[in-house]
Image (tube, grey):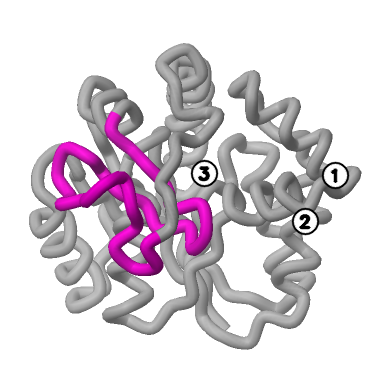
Amino acid sequence: MNNIILLAAPAGGKGTISKYISDKYKYEHISIGDLFRSEVNNNTDIGKKIASKMQKGLLIDDDIMFDVLRNRLINQNKDFIIDGVPRTLSQAKGYDKLLKELNINLERVIYISVDKEVALSRIKSRRICNKCGRVYNIDKDEINENKCLKCNSELSIRDDDNEVTFEKRYELFKNEADFLLEYYKDKVCEVKNNTKRRDAYKQIDDIFMKGDNIQW
């Protein structure tokens, strides 16, 4: 079983690109953010701790994160994409151990690069369906009466989708990004995602068709 890691700053496009890879190349998409939000929505003890961290734009403690992730992956039997993990070098080493423990092969790491101004603009325009979790950009997607096009439920703004939290999360990512890219340098492929989605999709297709890694 194979795994692809997606690395990107907040609002870099991990969700959009994950869905594209999942639909076209049949990898299951697993988001640590979605797993955390599930814990929060279910008001578990872990969820309460996670909620406090997320609202402040802070990283979740590694031991909590790996407990949540191990529970999700222990019965995984399909190739998958993971986004949101790792975000630090220590998490990368811990994730390597988890993959080895579960006999999962790390196939490649896709680094989605995006300018800070572009990412902030996406944060301000992002909306999420309260029921099915589908994500929209109100500046680009044709939305009627703030309703999800898939299930017709109300759209909302995530608690952590604000400029203050974004600044903290972006700086946290940038502080660790170089270390992660160096750590994974033999497996890293870069996708530039500052413009239209189809441009990013073409780069993804090139990666899968050629199987080439970009040395960092």
Q: Please indicate whether residue 189 sits to the left or right of residue 106 in the image.
A: left
Can see residue 112? yes
Quadrant where the N terminus sits is bottom right
In front: mark 3 or mark 2? 2
In space, the residues marked 1 and 3 are separated at their CA atoms by 30 Å
Disc 1 target residue: 46
Mark 3: few, some, or many residues within 10 Å (few <14, many ≥20)?
A: some
Q: Position of residue 186 (x, y in %)?
A: 41, 56
Q: Which one is in front, 210 or 83? A: 83
In the image, residue 197 above or below residue 174? below
Can see residue 188? no
Which residue shows up at 21% across the image and 50% down it?
143
Dots 1 and 2: beta carbons under 8 Å?
yes
Quadrant where the C terminus sits is top left
Q: Which one is in front, 134 or 216? A: 134
Q: What secondary structure predominates along the stretch shown in magenta? A: loop
Q: Position of residue 189 (x, y in %)?
A: 30, 55
Element at label 2: helix
Q: Position of residue 60 (x, y in %)?
A: 72, 35
Which quarter of the figure has residue 174? top left
Q: Residue furthest bottom?
A: 77
- The three-letter amino acid code for the residue at tag 3 is Tyr
Disc 3 target residue: 183
Disc 2 target residue: 68
Q: Please indicate whether residue 41 sits to the left or right of residue 25 in the image.
A: right
Mark 1: few, some, or many residues within 10 Å (few <14, many ≥20)?
A: some
In front: mark 1 or mark 2? 1
Q: Please indicate whether residue 73 sits to the left or right of residue 105 in the image.
A: right
Q: Which span is picked out in magenta?
A: 125-152
Which residue shows up at 33% across the image and 38% down it?
126
In front: mark 1 or mark 3? 1
Magenta segment: does it hold 118?
A: no
